[in-house]
Image: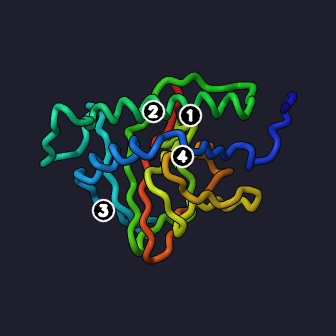
Amino acid sequence: MKRGNDLGNLQDYVKLYDKILDDQTCDDFLEIIKKANFERIESDLFKFKQTIITDDMMWHLDDMEVDENEASPLHIQDIFSGLFFSAATNYFQDTELPLVPELEGFENIRIKKFESGDFYKLHSDVNDYKSAKRFLSVMIFLENTDNCAIRFSNRSICDITPVRGSILVFPPHWLFPYEVVCRDDATMMYAHSYLHYV
């Protein structure tokens, strides 16, 4: 147990929760997500595709027709929201932090897709005034891959290999810079969001 100002090792604050989602739920998500309009995001720092749930709680799905008997994008938004808050709650219990921000809201959910040749170079998720409201980064892995990893630059933190249905939680600040590393023939997809300060 941590006492006083003893915050332990940085690796203690990178948590991977295995198999939170079962295979059927992941399949259901992927069935809807594959119909989404993914936008290519590219700079010197990164290259990947993503789709976002917007502020009005709707997906960017211009051409999508939703069957009333199937899971809808809004339904997935609700499920993801619950998963993010649940992961954050478990994270704060597991890390035993003495001061925890109130869980108020989260950023729009990004579905990030990495394909052959895509990358995200070393960075932190908080790097300016606009992003400073983020206090926790949460990733939900939707597919298994042995050829991609979330690699933290701090050597005490091991590479995270995506496991389908698992959730990765870590602070988004400068002490936890990371990169997405994929082999040329690899693919990876995950849902990503951030818990915000009130």
Density class for disc 4 (Cα within 10 Å; few <14, some 14-19, many ≥20) is many
**Residue 127 or 147: which is nearer the viewer?**
147
The disc, 1 or 3, on the residue closer to the chain's N-terminal end is 3
Closer to viewer: mark 2 or mark 1: 1
Q: Which residue is mark 4?
A: 166
Closer to viewer: mark 4 or mark 1: 4
CA distance separating discs 1 and 3: 28 Å
Q: Is residue 180 above or below residue 112?
A: below
The circle drawn on residue 87 is 1
In the shown orientation, is residue 175 left or right of residue 149? Answer: right
Q: Amino acid at mark 2?
A: Phe
> In the image, what residue occupies the spot 68% across and 50% down?
175
Q: Amino acid at mark 3?
A: Arg
Residue 37 % position (x, y)? 23, 53
The disc, 3 or 4, on the residue closer to the chain's N-terminal end is 3
Q: Which residue is mark 3?
A: 40
Q: Amino acid at mark 1?
A: Ala
Density class for disc 2 (Cα within 10 Å; few <14, some 14-19, many ≥20) is many
The disc, 2 or 1, on the residue closer to the chain's N-terminal end is 1
Q: Amino acid at mark 4?
A: Ser
Residue 39 % position (x, y)? 27, 57
Locate the N terminus by quadrant.
Answer: top right
The disc, 4 or 2, on the residue closer to the chain's N-terminal end is 2
Q: Which residue is mark 2?
A: 106
Q: Determine the secondary structure under disc 1.
A: helix
Q: Is residue 130 visible?
A: no
Question: Which quarter of the picture shows residue 72?
Answer: top left
> In the image, what residue occupies the spot 16% across and 31% down?
68
CA distance separating discs 4 and 2: 19 Å
Residue, far bottom: 184
